[in-house]
Amino acid sequence: MRVCLFEDRDVGNLEPLVWTRPAFELLSGCTSLARKQCRFFQASEVGALVRPYLAGLCQEQQPSMHWNDAAWLASERTIMVNARWLPPAEFIAALSEPCVGLVDDEVVFAIAEPEHLAGCCTSTIDDCVEAWKRAYPSVQAGGRLIRYLWELVQINATQIRADQQRFSLPRQESAVKIALVGPAHQLTIDPRARLDPMVVADCTRGPIIIEQDAVVTAFSRLEGPCFIGRGTHVLGARIRAGTSLGPQCRVGGEVEASILQGFSNKYHDGFLGHSYVGEWVNFGAGTNNSDLRNDYGVIAVPVKGEPVNTGLTKVGCFIGDHTKTGLGTLLNSGSSVGVCCNLLPAGQLLPKYFPSFCSWWNSTLTANANISSLMRTAAEVMARRERQFTERHAALYQSVFEQTADERRRMILETERRRLRRSA
C-alpha cells in the first residue's frame, strides 16, 4: 500500500521536539511512530507532507521517501496517515476501500482517491482532512492520537512491551554473564551487544531489549520494560522501567520512565525522570530534574509559552536538540527547554520555560544570537558520533532561529521585568 504521513495544525503542541523533526519521527517504545504506522498498513511505498523548512534535511537523510511531492501524492489511491497517530497493534480487517479512520472524532488516517488528493499540500492539509471526513465513510481506527509529549512518556512502558512481541533480534541468554532477575524470555540481547559482568537485568515487570553495538558496563541495573538502542552506552547506570534510550546515547546516573531520542549525553550522575530529551543534548555532571511536586499536585507544562494542565502528578522535562546544561543544573518539574539553549546553574530550580536559542546564566535570560558559533559547536558535537553537520542542518536551524525570534524577545523582556520588580 502507498502511505503518506502528514503533519496537521496541532503538531506545534509537540514542541520543542518537533522543531527539528517531523512528528512521526518521535520515539515510542522501541521504534518511531512512522515505523509503527508503516508497519500497520504494510506500506510498500512511503511519502510525507512535512513543514517546508524540514523537507530539505529529511530528503537528505531519507532519499527513498517522497517529501512534499504533490505529483506523486495525486497519482494513485493513497493512505494518508496523521503523523501524531499511534496505531493499535493489529491491522484493521477489510481496509481496502476509501474511508476515514477516527479517534475521538478526529481523522487519523484516510484512504483517499487521486481526485481527493489533487492540490493536497502542507498549506491545505487541514482543509483536505475535513473534506475527506465529509466525503468518505468512517471507521473506528483504534490506537491513540498523541496531543502532547508527556503522553508519549506516560505510555512508553506499554509500547516497549508491545514492541517486544514483534522484535526481530535473536535472543542471547547463556553467553551473557549477567545477573538475571525474572523470566529469561523477557530478555532480548543482540549478539553484537557487549555486557560486562556484574550487570543486573530485572525482567519481573517487563521486557529488556538491547540492540546491536550497545555497551552496558559493570554495576549497571536495568529494569524492564526498557529499551537500549543501537550503539548506546549504559555506564554504571540505573535504568528504571519505562525508559527508551535511542541510538548512540551515553547514559549514567539514574533514568526513570524517560525517552532519549538519540545521540545525547547524560554521562554523569544525576536524575532524569518522566522526561523526553531530543538529540545531541548534553547534561553536565550533577544535572537533576524534578518530576514530582512536593505537594503531590498536578503539574502544568508550558506549551508554546502557555501553561497546560497535564492531569498528571509525575512529569519531568522536555528538551530540544543541541541544548546543554552546566554542572549542577536543577530543572523544575514540567519544564520545557527549546533548541540550542545553554543553561547554567543558579543554585535553585530554573524557570520552567526557555524558548529556543536562549542562555540562562546568573539568573539572567539572554539570546544565543551568534548562530555561526552555535553551528560550529553543533558540527563538532556531531563529528564525535561520526555524523556530518551539513548545509541542510544549518538551514533548518537558521529557520528555527527566525521562527522563534518573537517568542525569545518576549520572554527576555518578561524575565527582565520580573527581575526589576523583585529588586524594587
Image: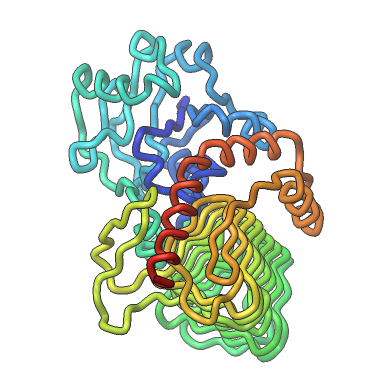
Looking at this view, is 229 or 122 the one in front? 122
Residue 250 lies left or right of residue 108; in this view the side is right
Residue at far front of view: 424
Residue in view at x 70 percent, y 79 percent: 195
Residue 207 visible within the image: no
Residue in view at x 45 percent, y 32 percent: 5
Residue 193 lies, in percent from the top left, at: 71, 69
Residue 196 lies left or right of residue 269; in this view the side is right
Residue 207 lies, in percent from the top left, at: 47, 72
User: 330 above or below 199?
Assistant: above
> Based on the displayed image, in which of its 4 quarters is residue 64 positioned?
top right
Residue 182 lies, in percent from the top left, at: 47, 85
Residue in view at x 21 percent, y 33 percent: 139
Residue 51 visible within the image: yes
User: 85 above or below 353?
Assistant: above
> Based on the displayed image, in which of its 4 quarters is residue 299 positioned?
bottom left
Residue 241 lies, in percent from the top left, at: 45, 76
Q: How is the image coloured?
A: rainbow
**How many numbered discs, if any?**
0
User: 116 above or below 309?
Assistant: above
> Based on the displayed image, in which of its 4 quarters is residue 179 positioned?
bottom right
User: 66 above or below 43?
Assistant: above
Residue in view at x 19 percent, y 24 percent: 137
Q: Quadrant of the C terminus?
A: bottom left
Q: Quadrant of the N terminus?
A: top left
Looking at this view, is 89 or 301 the one in front? 301
Residue 144 lies left or right of residue 281; in this view the side is left
Residue 263 lies left or right of residue 114; in this view the side is right
Looking at this view, is 213 or 130 the one in front? 130
